[in-house]
Image (cartoon, rainbow, N blue to C red):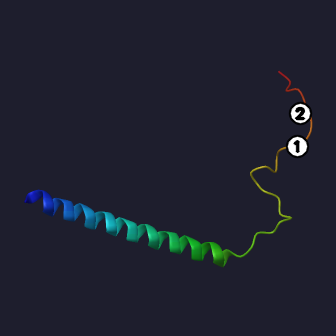
Amino acid sequence: MFTGMSKRQKELARQEHQKEKAAKAAQRKTEKESKGPRDPNAIDPDIAHIIPGPQPIPEE
């Protein structure tokens, strides 16, 4: 009899967690949409320092 109550509480906690996740996902989606499109000609800061082609031999 006690397992039913704990099972119910566990299920309610799971449902609440899913609602929170859905709310966070919706918030991220609206934030992403409000930023607007990225400039395709902009330089990506993660790869700005990379030089294409053969790399020079590092001097030791």
Residue beneath the point at 14% across and 63% down: 5
Residue beneath the point at 39% across and 71% down: 19
Q: Are marks 2 and 1 in contact (CB under 8 Å)?
A: yes
Q: Position of residue 14 (x, y in %)?
A: 32, 63
Q: Residues within 10 Å of mark 1 (few under 14, many from 20)?
A: few
Residue beneath the point at 86% across and 64% down: 41
Q: Is residue 51 above or below residue 38?
A: above
Q: Position of residue 50 (x, y in %)?
A: 83, 44
Q: Nearer the viewer, residue 36 or 48?
A: 36
Q: Which mark is residue 51?
A: 1
Residue beneath the point at 52% across and 74% down: 27
Q: Position of residue 49 (x, y in %)?
A: 82, 46
Q: Amino acid at mark 2?
A: Gln
Secondary element at image label 2? loop
Q: Which residue is mark 2?
A: 55
- Gap in angstroms between the C-alphas marked 2 and 1: 8 Å
Q: Nearer the viewer, residue 46 or 33?
A: 33
- Please count the marks in the image: 2
4 left or right, relative to 29: left
Q: Is residue 48 above or below residue 7?
A: above
Q: Amino acid at mark 1?
A: Ile
Q: Position of residue 3 (x, y in %)?
A: 13, 57
Q: Is residue 54 above or below residue 5?
A: above
Q: Quadrant of the C terminus?
A: top right
25 left or right, relative to 40: left
